[in-house]
Image: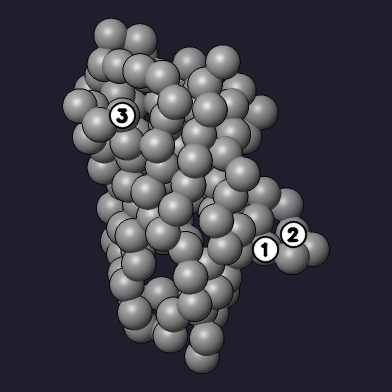
């Protein structure tokens, strides 16, 4: 079973940048075809897709709400995935979760393993 641990959250001001990290407990290597995704959940709202990256190809997917100001990347050797977010807005405030899927998808239900989440708070 894959265990995921997120880090890098915190309190920032609008316009700032932040990079979240996710470490997987076992090798979700390029041969596995896994996709690593980031989701977020604000209070009172559904958990929503943010970004995803395929280990094999490096292909990426982004939600419209973060496209152009966020970058997802991976380090295969370290088994880590990163989400860099720029020009942060108060509406980006949420708990951010890392997740793993065997499909290259934005669908929350297709992700089998989840981290515990890291809080990002953006003040105006």
**Residue 83: percent from the left, percent from the top?**
35, 52
Q: CA distance from mark 1 to mark 2?
A: 5 Å
Q: Secondary structure at mark 1?
A: loop
What mark, if any, has residue 59 been given in the picture?
Answer: none
Q: Is disc 1 surrounded by few (<14), some (14 to 19) or many (20+) residues within 10 Å?
A: some
Q: Secondary structure at mark 3?
A: loop
What mark, if any, has residue 79 been given in the picture?
Answer: 3
**Residue 44: percent from the left, percent from the top?**
79, 63
Image height of 103 relative to 74, above or below: above
**Residue 80: percent from the left, percent from the top?**
32, 36
Front one among 88 and 78: 78
Left or right, residue 62 beside residue 78: right
Q: Secondary structure at mark 2?
A: loop
Left or right, residue 110 beside residue 34: right
Q: Mark 1 near mark 2, Cβ–Cβ under 8 Å?
A: yes
- Which callout, 3 or 1, points at the residue further toward the start of the chain? 1
Q: Mark 3 near mark 1, Cβ–Cβ under 8 Å?
A: no
Q: Which residue is mark 2?
A: 45
Q: CA distance from mark 3 to mark 1?
A: 27 Å
Image height of 42 relative to 29, above or below: below
> What residue is drawn where x is 26% and y is 42%?
73
């Amino acid at each position: 079973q894959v265990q995921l641990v997120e880090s890098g959250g915190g309190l920032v001001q609008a316009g700032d940048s932040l990079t979240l990290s996710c470490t997987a407990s076992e090798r979700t290597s390029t041969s596995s075809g896994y996709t690593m995704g980031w989701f977020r959940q604000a209070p009172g709202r559904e958990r929503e897709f943010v970004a995803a990256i395929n280990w094999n190809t490096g292909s990426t997917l982004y939600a419209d709400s973060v496209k152009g100001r966020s970058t997802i990347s991976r380090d295969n050797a370290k088994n880590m995935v990163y989400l860099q977010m720029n020009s942060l807005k108060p509406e980006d405030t949420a708990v951010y979760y890392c997740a793993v899927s065997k499909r290259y998808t934005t669908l929350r239900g297709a992700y089998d393993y989840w981290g515990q989440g890291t809080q990002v708070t953006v003040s105006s």
